[in-house]
Structure formats: C-alpha cells, structure tokens
Amino acid sequence: MWRKGDVNMVPGSRPTVRAERLWADIMQLATFTEPDRPYTRRAFTEVYQAGRRWLAARMKEAGLAVRIDAGGNLIGRWEGTEPGRAPLMLGSHTDTVLGGGRFDGVVGVLGALEAVRALREAGVRLRHPVEVVDFLAEEPSDYGPSCIGSLALTGGLTPEMLAEVNPAGETLAAGIRRMGGDPRSLSAPLRRPGDIAAYVEMHIEQGPVLEQRGIPIGIVTAIASMEWHSVTLEGQPGHAGTTPMELRRDALTAAAEVILAVERTGRELATSGHCVATTGRLLVEPNNVNVIPGRVELTVDVRSHDPRRLADAWTHIRTAIEGISQTSGVRWTSRCLGRAEGAEADPQVMEALEGAAHALGYPTLRLASGAGHDAMHLARIAPMGMLFIPCRGGRSHCPEEWASPEDVARGTEVLVGALQWLDRSLP
C-alpha cells in the first residue's frame, strides 16, 4: 500500500531528480534541428543521427551500456543486481514531424535517462535491469510507416513495409541498415512476451485536459485504435466560365460534402463513446483558378477506443460518400492506408504510476490517449503503462509546443517512484 512520502521503495538515500540538468538536456537536444525550420529532426536524416550521437554520449556519461539493436533503436542499459531478470524498459522517441516541437517524445527519453541518473546517484540498485530506449521513427516516415522501431522490436514490420521506398528511392530496409540496424534479423520479433518485465513511457498529453483541470499527472488507461483511408473523387474538369452549374460534375464540391460527412460522423458517434474523425489532406486537380476541379484526393483519419465503433465510423462515412456520389455524378474509390490496433494499459503498471504520484502528493487523472505511441506496440509483449504531463494549450506537433520545467520534473519523479515499485513487485 502506497503512503504519501513513501517513494523510496528500496534501500539507499532518496533519489533526487535534477530538474535543471534535465531541462538543459531537453534544450540541448532541441538544437539538433533543420536551422530554417525549427523544430525539425526527421528520422533517418543527418541531423537526427547527430542528435542520437549526442544522446548516446549522455547515456554513456550516466554509466549505461549503449547499443543499437537490429531495428535501429538506440538502447542504454543499466544492469540490475539479479542476473537473468527481464528489464524494466522506459523510453519514447526523439524524431519529430516537420516543424514540430521540443517535447513530444523527447521528455519520455530524457526523462527516463534522468530517472536512471537519479537512482544511480542516490546509490539505489534495482533487481531488474533498466533499459532506456529511443525508438526509431515513431512519427510517420518518408518510407510510409510510423513506429518503425517499436514495430521492429515486437515483430510488426512486414517484408512489404521493409520494401517501401522513400522519395530518394531508398528502401526502408536500407534506411534501417544506415541507422545501424540489421533488417535481415527482422523476420522475427526482437523481443517476445516475457523478455520485458514492463514498459513505461512518459509523454506530453498533446491535448488540453490536464492543463484545463490543473492536474499535473495523467495516468493513461488505453490508446485508441485508428485507421487511415485515402478517398479519390473523379468528376469532370471544365471551364469555370462556360459550364452551366446544372451540368457540372465538380469533384471539389463533392469533396466538401464528404468532409462535412466525416465531421458529422465523428460528432454523432462521439455521443455514445470515444470517436474522432478528421479529413487531413486534400489534393485538387487541376487546381487552377478558372477550371472546375476534376479530381480530388483526400485522407480520412478515424480513431476510437472501441474497435466496433471504429468500424462503424468508416461504414457510416462510406455510406455517406456513396450517397454524395449518386447525387453529384462524381465517381469515388478508396483504399486503406493503414490501421493501428489500440492497447489497454496494464492495471499493475497504472497502479505503480498512480501510487508513485500520490506518494509525492501529486493529483492524478485517468484518461485515454487518442494519439498513437510506441507503447501500443510494446503492449503486445509486455505490461504497458504511460503517464502524461500537461502541455500548454494542448498544442503539439508545432514549434509552440511547450511543457514547463516543473511538469517535466514532476513526471520524472513519478517515473523514479514507479520504477522502484515495479522492481519490488514484478518477478
């Protein structure tokens, strides 16, 4: 049973998170960016590799044994006192989207490193090894797939994915090899059930709930399942001045109706449970000021914590598109761009995170994640848990993304306590 103040779960002095050191690390990693487009550190690029070299050096300074596994994941390992025990794994990612932020993923990697430093500096030894992992390419990559490193770790990278090419014509397999991995070893999972005692990931919320409620720690209960679809609408291009309105087959006006149908579907299904639906990208042809659009491609992103509601959402959207097609005379096709199965957080890991926060006097809120994370793939093979910290305005994937030094430090303190609790309670 946790009690307030009961955060030092093993012999030794109380571990102290050095907030200034952690913040300096976050700011230093942010300097590894495309100079004309902060904060951009795309996986597989030279600036990404430079950032990883800096991170590997920081891991070594902290006394970790550093390696890159076959999936291109950067791993720092701190050995435990009892050989043969499966490691406690902490981590996230250090790649960004174009024009991203300084905290998405980064707080999970550098917070994990600081948690290990705090334990080591306090003279605390854990029975289990601890692995701090920077997963390769959590964000959508130039090859197509996202969460490449965590998929590789858990056996989710297919031969078809490895054969995908980036705009330069390089295959994903070649890219992983360039990152120090070994794609020949990815036909089987790098880790299997039982190989990891537990996986814990700290992350900014990427939403406004914690900030609005004034709560410093979020305990993630589940990660949503999600689907991405591409919809193509084929009308008939024509002169904008000479084609009567009643004779037009305008692909863009049909697309506008589809966009509203996607929005309507998300709102209607959200009344009975979690569901969000988004049109994220449009490509219009010929895209000229005086030509009726003849072709539009758009993407649909649908997410829900309930797989059945997710399936219902796409069914409703398809039905709506078919009706729009019939009334507008615009043909349509669709293809699935990808699916990601959601995951439930492990109750024991949730208890460890929640208990550690309460022992420190920090209020918590249980909430689900609508964003995908490496943790959803780790849940296939290990007990998984996540903690969220607030981010200003709920903003993420933009340069204005911000988490306060105090919130980053609080989250890291919770990691320290949860690590000790899990080390005592897990086999």
Image (cartoon, rainbow, N blue to C red):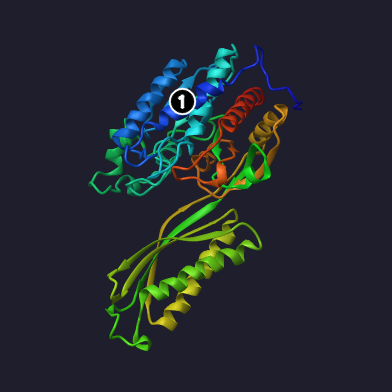
Whole-percent x, y for residue 126 in the image: 59, 18
Q: Quadrant of the N terminus?
A: top right
- Which residue occupies the foreground of this view, 390 or 86? 390
Q: Residue at x 28, y 76 (%)?
A: 291
Answer with the quarter of the image where residue 138 lies: top left
Q: Quadrant of the C terminus?
A: top right
Q: Residue furthest left?
A: 169
Is residue 238 among what the camera can see? yes
The secondary element bearing badge 1 is classed as helix
What kind of residue is marked 1?
A: Asp
Horizontally, residue 289 falls left or right of residue 338, namely left
Label total for image:
1
Answer with the quarter of the image where residue 146 lies: top left
Is residue 85 among what the camera can see? no
| Rendered position, 1 above or below 78 | below
- Which residue occupies the foreground of this view, 159 or 8? 8
Q: Residue at x 35, y 49 (%)?
A: 144
Mark 1 closeness class: few <14, some 14–19, many ≥20 residues within 10 Å: some
Q: Residue at x 33, y 67 (%)?
A: 284
The residue under label 1 is 25
